[in-house]
Image (tube, rainbow, N blue to C red):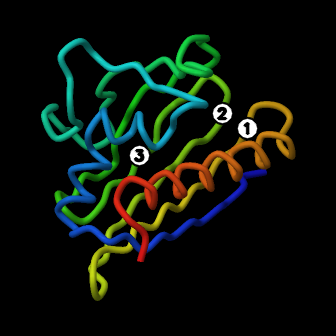
Amino acid sequence: MPYSLKFSTRLAASKQDVWEWITSLDGISREMAPYMRMTAPKGMTSINSLAFQPGQRMFRSWILLFGLIPFDFSDLTLESLDKGEGLVEQSPMGSMRLWRHERRLASVEGGCELTDKLTFEPRFAGWLTFRIIRAFFRHRHRNLGRYLGKL
């Protein structure tokens, strides 16, 4: 049974600045810190710098607990990449039958609203995985507000 979650945060940063953040390896790493980190190909600094073909795997990323312990992988695959507007990731993962992560940006007075919509189906421990992912994305959105300013 798939689970769904939605998170929105209004940020005191322009849509362009938030876009640069959510597509940069540094921004993604800061959002996830200190609990997780994702690996990327050597020299990659941004998803924007990679060739994009809808539905084609871009690279394998190892997901590291506390930045050190590999516990899962994601074959990073984007369904859409609308520069400055959002993206849809639907990546095969070791721990998930389904992982779909949609990120959308909308201009608001004084900044930008970032919305994450998640649909996922864990291979095991569904109720526990749901709670962990919910807590983790709440953490990510707190970090977004901390680094980009919250409206």
Left or right relative to 74: residue 82: left
Task: Identify the residue at image location x=21%, y=35%.
Answer: 46
Q: Secondary structure at mark 1?
A: strand
Q: Secondary structure at mark 2?
A: strand
Task: Tell me how far mark 1 sits from mark 2, CA to CA.
Answer: 4 Å
Q: Amino acid at mark 1?
A: Pro
Q: Amino acid at mark 2?
A: Met
Residues tagged 1 and 2 counted as in contact (Cβ below 8 A): yes
Question: Is the residue marked by circle 2 packed among few (<14), some (14-19), or many (20+) residues within 10 Å?
Answer: many
Q: Which residue is mark 3?
A: 89
Question: Is the residue marked by circle 1 packed among few (<14), some (14-19), or many (20+) residues within 10 Å?
Answer: many
- Give the image location of residue 103, x and y in percent: 40, 59
Q: Nearer the viewer, residue 80 or 105?
A: 105
Label number found at residue 122 = 1
Task: Tell me how far mark 2 sits from mark 3, CA to CA.
Answer: 14 Å
- Give the image location of residue 111, x and y in percent: 28, 77
Q: Which residue is mark 2?
A: 96
Task: Tell me how far mark 1 sits from mark 3, CA to CA.
Answer: 16 Å
- Give the image location of residue 116, x and y in percent: 49, 61
Q: Which badge, 1 or 3, is on the more N-terminal residue? A: 3
Left or right relative to 18: residue 8: right
